[in-house]
Image: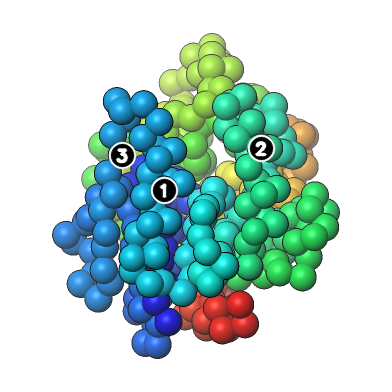
Amino acid sequence: MKIAILADPLDNQSAGVHTYTKGMVNALIQYDQINEYVLIRQRKDPSFSANVRQIGVPIFPYIPFFSSFRLFVLIPLICRWQKVKAVVEPAHFGPFNLPASIKRITVIHDLTPLLFPQYHRLYGRSLQKLFLPRILRRADKILTVSEHSKKDINKQFPFTTPKTKVIYPGRDPFFYPDHSPKVLKKFGVDYPFFLSVGTIEPRKNLVLLLKAFERYCKLVNSETFLVIAGGKGWKSEKFFEALEQHPFRKKIRFVGRVSKEDLRVLYSHSIALIYPSIYEGFGLPILEAYSCGTAVICSNSSSLPEVGGKLATYFDPLDEIELVESMSKLYCSFRNRALVKDQFINFSKTFFWRNYVHEFMKMIKET
């Protein structure tokens, strides 16, 4: 079967959906020897696998309404021209204008624009509210990344229940213990430190993290550093105001978006990844940290317990004192990390892309 993947997230995103799409495409190319895949994206990548066809459909932002024309007319025409039997849209928005003979698989990572509209811009949440019900009704299959997201989707849109399937993404083999000291010098980090990873936006709950770090420094250890890695997202002003006014600002390193190589080293050296997010569809940084042999402190909300399993240290994302207690606990056990490092790594390996492909192929056959 020829299957098209609308792979724009490879070109226009850099956070979770990008990582998911890249992992999914690479896994399907590697493990699926039956189906044929076509990537429809903004531009071809010459470094990508030669085993998959790429069709570049550029976006011209200065041409009025061209993005809509591309989405609703050009891409559907290409799918017909390529005679694909199914189209996968991995970024919440489509596919559109396909004949009934072409099956539609829509990936929904989470419903945060609908469940937490206050954390999103008006434009984005309005588009989701307007288009998502129609997208879900027309989808032949709805693929999601956690049982919690499935529950939310089915609750908000009961008609989706019989066609929603959960397939966990796999771990990225790029992440493994890497203790190169050069990266720490590069960012001016004195060991030890806690690490936070993710786009700077309200849902990530980083203002609470800053408050907890202040309390931690006063009550536990003022020598500990906090490293925050992530690109600037929407509604991030309150975070940056709190950061600049922080009484322990000299102990905080905001390093922005970093390379995967640098991120691997930061994970490997840190006391723990702190992931205080209020809501996540999955939570890939948890798997990345585990793969590097690193402990995780994360919220007990949404899907995060599915990813963190029994090894994570959980806290109420609205309770900064509980987070401080978790940080203190992990700091005290940090010197004995070598005794449990393999447990983190082995647990991360239970999320593997080969299984994803196996379940994906079953879903396609049933569609």
Residue at (67% x, 41% y) in the render: 112
Query: Element type at marker 2?
Result: helix
The count of marks equals: 3
Please name the residue that numbered disc 1 is placed on: 73
- In the orientation shown, which residue stands out farthest toward the bottom? 34
Find out whether the residues at labels 1 and 3 contact each other: C-beta distance under 8 Å. no
**Dot 1: few (<14), some (14–19), or many (≥20) neighbours within 10 Å?**
some
Residue 191: horizontal and vertical position, in percent? 41, 41
Snapshot quadrant of residue 48: bottom left
Please name the residue that numbered disc 2 is placed on: 130
Query: Element type at marker 1?
Result: helix
Residue 209: horizontal and vertical position, in percent? 62, 32
Query: Where, quadrant-wise, is the N terminus in this rendering?
Result: bottom left
**Dot 3: few (<14), some (14–19), or many (≥20) neighbours within 10 Å?**
some
Find out whether the residues at labels 1 and 2 contact each other: C-beta distance under 8 Å. no
Residue 96: horizontal and vertical position, in percent? 52, 53
Alpha carbon distance from label 3 to label 2: 23 Å
First-in-chain label (1 vs 3): 3
Snapshot quadrant of residue 182: top left
Please name the residue that numbered disc 3 is placed on: 59
Q: Amino acid at mark 3?
A: Ile
Front in this rendered view, residue 339 or 106: 106
Check the image and report above or below for 283 versus 82: above
Query: Where, quadrant-wise, is the C terminus in this rendering?
Result: bottom right
Left/right placement of residue 171 relative to residue 156 reads: left
Residue 198 visible at all? yes
Alpha carbon distance from label 1 to label 2: 19 Å
Check the image and report above or below for 61 versus 103: above
Q: Amino acid at mark 1?
A: Val
Residue at (39% x, 63% y) in the render: 79
